[in-house]
Image (tube, rainbow, N blue to C red):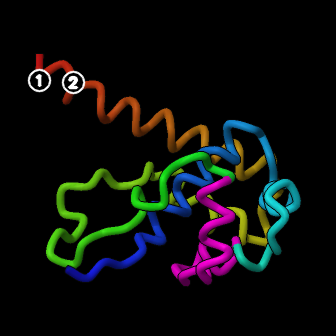
């Protein structure tokens, strides 16, 4: 059975932990002792080398298997990363937005997602 690395899930996990620790991507790279370009490549969907992958999952404190997907089990039933996690790198790449602007937009998106999901939760009850 062939497996591949779910780079999107790995990046989402790193982004979530980065946000929790209130770190920039550069600060995160420094703390993990990896190059910032590794994190940039991940944000573009490129796979890390084996040593880098081991460093990332060790730092996250999760088993590497969490990010391996069997080709026969494509991530149909896997939860998608949060919307803010997906659009965050795009916002941060914009030169016309300050870090405060990016935070503000992310907060708006998070509030909107919560608002949209609220009626669904009420209907499920």
Residue 118, by quadrant, is: top left
The residue shown at (63%, 47%) is 105
Work out which quarter of the rendered image holds the N terminus and state it.
bottom left
* Residue stretch in magenta: 39-58
| 45 over 58 or under it: above or below | below
Residue that mark 1 sits on: 124
Is the C terminus in the top left, top right, bottom left or bottom right quadrant? top left
Q: Residues within 10 Å of mark 2 (few under 14, many from 20)?
A: few
List x then y, in percent, for residue 102. 71, 52
Reading the image, the residue beneath label 2 is 121
Q: Give the overall secondary structure of the magenta segment.
A: helix
In this orientation, which residue lies closer to the viewer: 82 or 39? 39
Residue found at the very far top of the displayed protein: 125
Residue located at (79% from left, 68% from top):
96
Q: Position of residue 122 (x, y in %)?
A: 18, 19
Q: Residue at x 70, y 47 (%)?
A: 18
Label 1: state its secondary structure.
helix
Q: Is residue 55 magenta?
A: yes
The residue nearer to you, when weighing 99 against 54, is 54
46 vs 121, left or right, is right
Q: Looking at the image, which is closer to me, 31 or 98?
A: 31
């Amino acid at each position: 059975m062939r497996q591949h690395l779910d780079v999107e899930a790995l990046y989402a996990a790193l982004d979530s932990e980065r946000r929790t620790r209130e770190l920039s991507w550069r600060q995160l790279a420094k703390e993990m002792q990896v190059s910032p370009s590794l994190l940039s490549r991940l944000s573009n969907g490129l796979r890390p080398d084996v040593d880098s992958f081991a460093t990332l999952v060790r730092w996250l404190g999760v088993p590497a298997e969490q990010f391996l997907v069997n080709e026969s089990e494509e991530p149909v039933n896997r939860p998608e990363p949060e919307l803010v996690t997906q659009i965050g790198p795009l916002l941060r790449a914009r030169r016309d937005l300050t870090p405060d602007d990016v935070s503000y937009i992310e907060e708006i998106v998070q509030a909107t997602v919560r608002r949209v999901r609220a009626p669904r939760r009420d209907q499920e009850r």
